Image (spheres, rainbow, N blue to C red):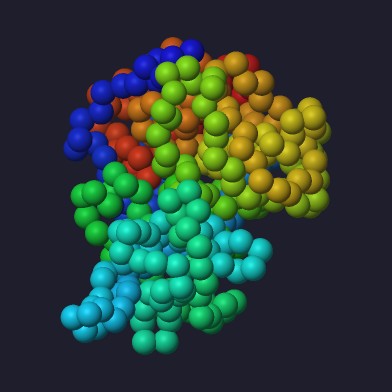
Amino acid sequence: MKLDDFDFDLPEDRIATRPVFPRSKAKLLVAQGDAITDATVGDLPDWLRPGDRLILNDTKVIPARLTGQRHRDSAQGPVSARIEATLLSPDPQGNWQALLKPLKKIRVGEVIQFADDFHATLTDVQDGQGVLAFNKSGEAFERALNEVGAMPLPPYIAARRAADAQDKTDYQTIWAKNTGAVAAPTASLHFDAELMQALTARGVEVTHVTLHVGAGTFLPVKVDDVTTHRMHAEWGQVSAQAAEEIAATQAAGGRIIAVGTTALRLIETAGRDGQIAAWEGETDIFIYPGFEFQVTNALITNFHLPKSTLLMLVSALMGQGEIRAIYDHAVRENYRFFSYGDASLLIPAGRG
């Protein structure tokens, strides 16, 4: 299975840099087996059944991109350097792994000043990443981060425009609760209060799980034989209550529909033994064609990058030929791609 098997041509103008407003007005491609229908996200209740259960990732994205100054005394007097920090993940002591640019401009023990009363000390450098110890923790840290941080937009958006205040709303789900992600579960960005009310009226149920999406989600696959690719690990949790709700829906004949690839990867991790169970830890599950799904009946997701692990995941769910046809249709019909783009409802033959 070669990396080129998951390539496709995408015109540059199909990459969305802002979401549609209202959120549920985005386009929705519905694929049932090899049948494709064009709809909108607001039509989703018409495609779901009473008793179906949506699995929602309730992680909360932090404004993880910071810009500050490193000050130093030199033979010529005080000097400073502009340092950009992108927070990646916290350690048990509350320090943060971070990408620092330019890393060569700062030494271990030096301080980066992000605001008058908000700074961090570089305590270590590991594998090209810095370890930052902040002067605030807990709620005080979150408040400071919300004041001075910017949303860590994906590279394909950040290359076209800078993050702004609107992204703090746009790049967050309406049910975001558990802080820890540095990238959004983007399929969930299409849901607004009006759509949730319509889904409830339809008899569709929801279950919340948590997977903190890491920056590794944007890492390219660098091996030609995709089966040798090693996935990044991300922390997740399926509570006992969530597992019970999913099992009850399965027993009643309802469908389990993951909203986003992060929710899908998590419930498939928790269901590897053939039935869903409470689970907590780091998952590096890699889903590519040949994978046997234990929990998921269908998936709501955005349109993904060529040669990405997410394109491999949807190919595993629907079939490589089917996904090729779906993406050809999406390009031809001017669907918007990637994090702020349009959505798809993927219902594989035999599971819907």
| Position of 332 relative to 49 (above/below) | above
Instruction: Let me know if residue 202 appears in the view.
Output: no
Tell me the residue at 48%/13% (across/down). Answer: 1
Question: Residue 12: x and y, percent?
Answer: 20, 35
The residue that appears at 41% across and 74% down in the rendered structure is 110
Q: Nearer the viewer, residue 79 or 285?
A: 79
Give whichever of 154, 302 is nearer the camera.
154
In the rendered image, which quarter contains the C terminus? top right
Q: Position of residue 29 (x, y in %)?
A: 40, 31
In this view, which residue lies farthest toward the bottom?
A: 116
Residue 17, image x, y percentages: 26, 49
Does residue 339 sit above or below 64 in this rendering?
Answer: above
The answer to whether residue 227 shows anywhere in this view is yes
Which residue is rendered at x = 77% and y = 37% of the image? 276
348 vs 171, left or right, is right
Indicate whether 133 appears above or below 295: below
Vertical comparison of 163 with 4: above or below: below
Residue at 32 percent of width and 59 percent of height: 104
x and y percent of residue 95 in the render?
56, 67
User: Number of labelled discs?
Assistant: 0
